[in-house]
Each structure stands twice: as C-alpha cells, then as structure tokens.
Image (cartoon, rainbow, N blue to C red):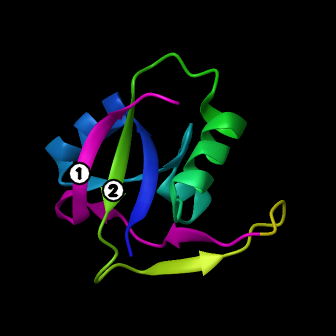
Amino acid sequence: MTVLHLALAADWEHAQAAGQYRISTLGRTLEEEGFIHACADLAQLHGVFQRFYRDVTDPLVLLTIDPAGLDVRLEVPGDSAEAFPHIYQPLPVTAVISATAFTPA
C-alpha cells in the first residue's frame, strides 16, 4: 500500500532541506493538527483537491509515500464516511517514493 499527500511545492522544498516534512494540510502544521492528512488512493486525492485545494494558485506536488515503518492510522473523519490515512509523526523525506508536479485532471 502507498499513501498519497498533496503538498505545496515550497513546503516540499523546505522539507527536503530539513530532512522531514511537517505540514499536516494546507495552512496547518503537524504540531497544530496532530497528524499529517493523507489519501489512500487517487479518488480520495481528487476529492481532497476539489474540497480544499482547487483555489490554490501555488504549485502543488503529489507525494507518494511508503508507509512501512511509519505511524499511519486509517481513520474516518467526522465529515466523511470513508477512512483516510493519517501519519502521526514527522514524515522523513526518505519515505517519499516520488514527488511529482500535480495538475488536476
């Protein structure tokens, strides 16, 4: 299984320099939210994009993450009927399999 996360390109660049990614979601840090929001598949990702990122004009990056060795929990948010992966730790950049420019379909 892989885990997906949308990131601002600038946040990903900062993470690469720091060695770890600490952004939970758009405008909120891991420390503020308690975990990093993620998606289990492209359908979830596109839903998240439409709900939270569609008005973002900054470049976005799709992070594909290997969850092995990470504290990842599948949880159902209060406003959803489906489970989403949440990462309960800083994300080491070494756990990111790929980081590609994201352009919505």
**Circle 2 is placed at which residue position?**
64
Residue at mark 1: 98
| Numbered circle sitting on residue 44 | none
Q: Is residue 82 above or below residue 52?
A: below
Secondary element at image label 2: strand
Q: Which residues are magenta?
A: 82-105
| Residue 82 x, y percent position in the rendering | 73, 69
Contact check, label 2 and label 1, Cβ < 8 Å: yes
Q: Is residue 86 above or below residue 15?
A: below
Q: Residue furthest front?
A: 105
Give the left or right position of residue 55, taking residue 62 as reference: right
Residue 93 image position (x, y, % from top left): 21, 57
Q: Please provide percent x and percent y for residue 56.
A: 56, 22
Direction from residue 1 to residue 34 in the image, left or right: right
**Is-magenta flag for residue 96?**
yes
Crowding at dot 2, Cα within 10 Å, few <14 / some 14-19 / many 20+, comes out as some
Residue 78 image point, x, y percent: 83, 66
Residue count near mark 1 (Cα–Cα under 10 Å), binned few <14, some 14–19, many ≥20: some
**Residue drawn at point x = 75 percent, y = 67 percent:** 77
Give 55 or 2, whichever is nearer the viewer: 2
Q: Nearer the viewer, residue 29 or 3?
A: 3
Query: Could you tell which of marks 2 and 1 lies nearer the N-terminus?
Result: 2
Name the secondary structure under disc 1: strand
| Type of amino acid under label 1 | Ser
Q: Residue at x 45, y 19 (%)?
A: 58
Decide whether residue 87 is among the magenta residues. yes
The amino acid beneath tag 2 is Thr
